[in-house]
Image (cartoon, rainbow, N blue to C red):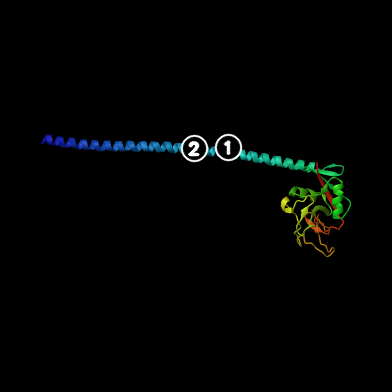
Amino acid sequence: MLNNQKLADFESLNNQHIMISKQLSAQEINGTILIRELEECKSNYTRVRDRFQLHDVMKKELNDLTARYNTLRNWLSFYDAQFCNLSVDGWIACRGKLYLFSSDKLNWSSSRDVCVSKEAKLVTITNQKEQDFLVSKVKQTHWIGLNDLETEGHWVWVNNQTLKETGVQFWFSGGPREPDNWKKQDPSGENCAALGDERGNFQSWFDASCEKLKTFICEKIY
């Protein structure tokens, strides 16, 4: 009986040993998995941290570049304003062009001919900066180099560029929209364009009878 009891106790302890060994083995496997997951989490954390640090560096560089750009733009605007006031024999230099604001009043075709005689042409306006510069200089309406003499409604500059090609136009839109080809004063209509009108609207273009007498603006490249 005693031997049988000892054998039973041995088998019980052996079974417990086997069970504990299995549990320890399972825990060891789980521990290995946990260690691997921990290393992966650490690697991901490092990558994300480095990415945020790089983002901060790039953000700072972008802010520095933006500040530098704004500073240079302000300086350029300052020098533009100074340079656009330089005058040579009555011509005002601005951004690669010379402009002459006449004091004489002529019809459109005579104005064009006077500009040609000065090896220039009636002004062609191709961007907002040029428009703003001219507006800042005029106190009365001036002829510009735009007309629809050949085909009604097809406005062409004296250099044969169309408004579609130059890409900008500044027709008056504050009342009756321009161009309106009004024929009350001239039966042939209003086929020539001017910067400003007699009512002091110098920010916009107006169509007018080509026979009207106006001051005018010549331009040439230098």
Pick the front one: 179 or 83? 179
Q: Quadrant of residue 77?
A: top right
Q: Which residue is mark 1?
A: 57
Percent across and percent down for residue 70 are 69, 42
- Taking the spot 19% from the left edge, 37% from the top edge, the residue there is 12
Q: Is residue 142 left or right of residue 34?
A: right
Pick the front one: 163 or 201? 163
Mark drawn on residue 207:
none
Whether residue 16 is visible, yes or no, is: yes
Q: Amino acid at mark 1?
A: Val
In the rendered image, the residue lying farthest to the front is 150
Q: Which mark sits nearer the N-terminus, 2 or 1?
A: 2
Percent across and percent down for residue 197 are 82, 57
- Taking the spot 72% from the left edge, 42% from the top edge, the residue there is 74
Q: CA distance from mark 2 to mark 1?
A: 15 Å
| Disc 2: CA contacts within 10 A as few (<14), some (14-19) or many (>=20) | few
Whether residue 101 is visible, yes or no, is: no
**Quadrant where the image shows the N terminus:** top left
In the rendered image, the residue lying farthest to the left is 1
Pick the front one: 217 or 162? 162
* Helix, strand or loop status at disc 2: helix
* Helix, strand or loop status at disc 1: helix
Percent across and percent down for residue 177 are 75, 61
| Disc 1: CA contacts within 10 A as few (<14), some (14-19) or many (>=20) | few
Q: Which residue is mark 2?
A: 47
- Taking the spot 68% from the left edge, 40% from the top edge, the residue there is 69
- Taking the spot 86% from the left edge, 50% from the top edge, the residue there is 113
Pick the front one: 76 or 173? 173
Q: Amino acid at mark 2?
A: Arg
